Amino acid sequence: MVRIVIDEREKVSELPNLIRELGAKVEFAQLDIGDYIISYDCSVERKSVRDLISSIYDGRLFDQILRLQKEYEKAYLLVEGDLNEIEEYSENPKAIYGAIISILLNTKVKLIYSPNPFVSAQLILILEDHLRRKIGIRAPLLKKKKKGDDLYEQQLTLISSLPGVGEKLGKRLLEAFGSPKKVFNASISELARVKGLGYARAKRILKALESKYGEGFKIYQKRLEDIEE
């Protein structure tokens, strides 16, 4: 039987029941990343049009997308609802369109559009069927973490999320400074001395750590507006 693991927060939606009615086994779990796990290497982040708009404005979507593509080889953003709501509920619709294009161009996440939950249920099960036929195996959907790895993974994820760092440089930074706190407190010259980092990346890191919250998104919006003009 087809099995889909769904984030507990999706219980309020009708989509899990629709998936169940189409013959799949539905299991709920507290997921840190993604909303619907289709296979061991595939997950779907589901957004209503209104949630898409709000998550772009508060910066939540970009964080979710980056984490999703890091954890899963095949990652999808499912946008569900009436796309006309973008024009209706967004003060700057072109900024929303620009953010979507940015995700498609700069990440490996693919976009799926659905007009309603019933179509979403069918799309998810068709996706599962295609992946199963291609892979030919049924692997555990939830990845098991080794005991004791949680703190290490948290620290590495924290440092790897810094501008221009990634996992490889994240490990070097932690090895060089000993803890995330010491990395954050390091001067630009201390950061630049880490092999492979350099002054330019060190400068970007300091700017990200020292800039006022929300300032980066305002700059991003301004760039979009300049492009539109």
Image: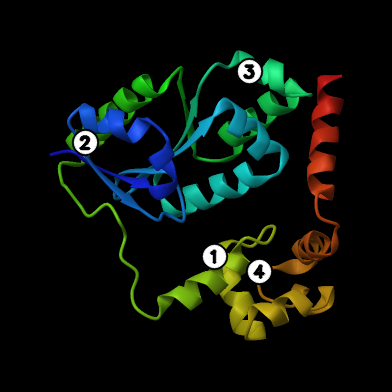
Identify which residue, 77 or 196, lies in the foreground.
77
Q: Which mark is residue 167?
A: 1
Would residue 155 be found to the left or right of residue 209 on screen?
left
Q: Residue drawn 17% across and 47% down? A: 138
Q: Residue furthest bottom?
A: 178
Q: Where does label 3 land, which residue?
A: 85
The alpha-carbon separation of the residues under discs 4 and 3 comes to 45 Å
The alpha-carbon separation of the residues under discs 4 and 1 comes to 12 Å
Q: Where does label 4 land, which residue?
A: 196
User: Is 185 rendered above or below residue 129?
Assistant: below
For label 4, the SS is loop
Residue type of the residue flagged with mark 1: Glu
Q: Residue drawn 48% across and 48% down? A: 68
For disc 3, the neighbor class at 10 Å (few under 14, some 14 to 19, many from 20) is: few
> Which of disc 2 and disc 3 is earlier in sequence?
3
Q: Residue drawn 61% across and 28% down? A: 50
For disc 4, the neighbor class at 10 Å (few under 14, some 14 to 19, many from 20) is: few
Quadrant containing the C terminus is top right
> Which of disc 1 and disc 3 is earlier in sequence?
3
Q: Where does label 2 land, which residue?
A: 134
The alpha-carbon separation of the residues under discs 3 and 2 comes to 36 Å
For label 1, the SS is helix
For disc 1, the neighbor class at 10 Å (few under 14, some 14 to 19, many from 20) is: some
Q: Percent from the top left, x then y, of residue 190?
A: 78, 80
Residue 60 visible in image: yes
Residue type of the residue flagged with mark 4: Gly
Q: Percent from the top left, x then y, of residue 224?
A: 79, 29
> Which of disc 4 and disc 2 is earlier in sequence?
2
Q: Residue furthest left?
A: 1
Identify which residue, 106 or 86, lies in the foreground.
86
For disc 2, the neighbor class at 10 Å (few under 14, some 14 to 19, many from 20) is: few
Would you say the residues marked 2 and 4 are in contact, meaning their CB atoms lie under 8 Å apart?
Answer: no
